[in-house]
Image (cartoon, helix red, strand yellow):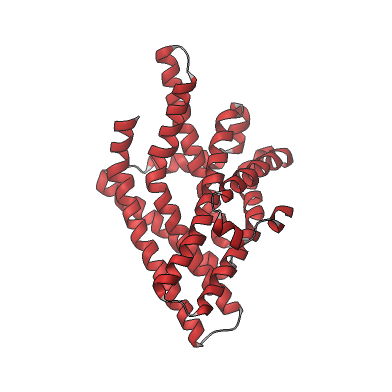
Amino acid sequence: MVIESFITPMKAEKRPWQMMLLGVFYSSVAIMFSYIISPNNSSMLMVFFTVMACMPIIYNTIKYEESKDEKGLSEVRLLKEHYRALEVFIFLFLGITLSFSVWNIVLPESISLNLFSAQFETMQSVNANATSMSGRFFGIFMNNLEVLFWCTAFSFLYGLGAIFILTWNASVIGFAIAKFIKSNLANLAQQLGAVSTAGYIQIYSCGYFVRYLPHGLLEIAAYFMAGLAGGILSVAVIRHRLGTKGFMDIVFDSADLLLISFIVIFIAGLVEVFMTPGFVGLVC
């Protein structure tokens, strides 16, 4: 895309918040094109189109991060450098999630049902498996661990495979946020007879920032760290550095990222099960 000529990894890491705007733009265009091309299959098409648009900046950022491993930086300094790339990915993800949730709310129900049919089925499946808090934590942790594994494997084998998994998760989270907001708006409208602007903003803030963001940001950060680890390793293999000292340095760097992502996933599960319900009850 033409936009890639204006946004390089170095520019993105200096102003990561701009990636949020890019995520909103990419996903909004993807929603429009997917519904025009095939309304009945639009829920998956919009994910694919968003992924296609994000590929250049993601690939160039991973290559840029792999090049940092060649500079002989200390492990602490290297992790700090990778944190900049993580910010880029997270802001991109937030933009995509925000776009999916807003379009799901503002579009007519008949259109949004087609656009998010696959996401709706996924949410039903997740809700059907709800159990006790300890059982729910184990289920969430194992599910997140599986996603973590596939992010790493897809990034290593396909270079950019993780971006599809993460964009799919953004669409599901966006749908969940919109569903939460719609149900609360309906309840508020029943009680008050109408929904004020202040009430709408309060409910959207509760849905976006309180219900899903605390654990969602941790999960996505972990997934991106795993994807970055797999992507860096993949680029190193492609460049024929197998068996060299530089390659082993990259292996250790990737292992550090994977270890941190595992710890973050564990913390995210604790937050989602034991803390988020309390936040929602207190604030919302």
Residue 177 appears left or right of 262: right
**Where residue 216 sits: x, y (%)?**
42, 47
Q: Tell me, yes or no, if residue 171 can be seen here.
A: no
Q: Is residue 26 above or below residue 209?
A: below
Q: Which of 184 and 68 is in front in this view?
A: 68
Q: Nearer the viewer, residue 106 or 283?
A: 283
148 with respect to 40 (left or right): left
Residue at 57%, 62% (x, y): give it: 161
Query: Residue reaching furthest bottom?
Result: 244
Q: Is residue 6 left or right of residue 183?
A: right
Image position, residue 25 (x, y; %): 64, 44
Which quadrant does the N terminus fall into? bottom right
Q: Which residue is drawn at 53% across and 43% down?
A: 97
Residue situated furthest front in the rendering: 14
Q: In which quarter of the image is the C terminus?
A: top left
Image-quadrant location for residue 207: top left
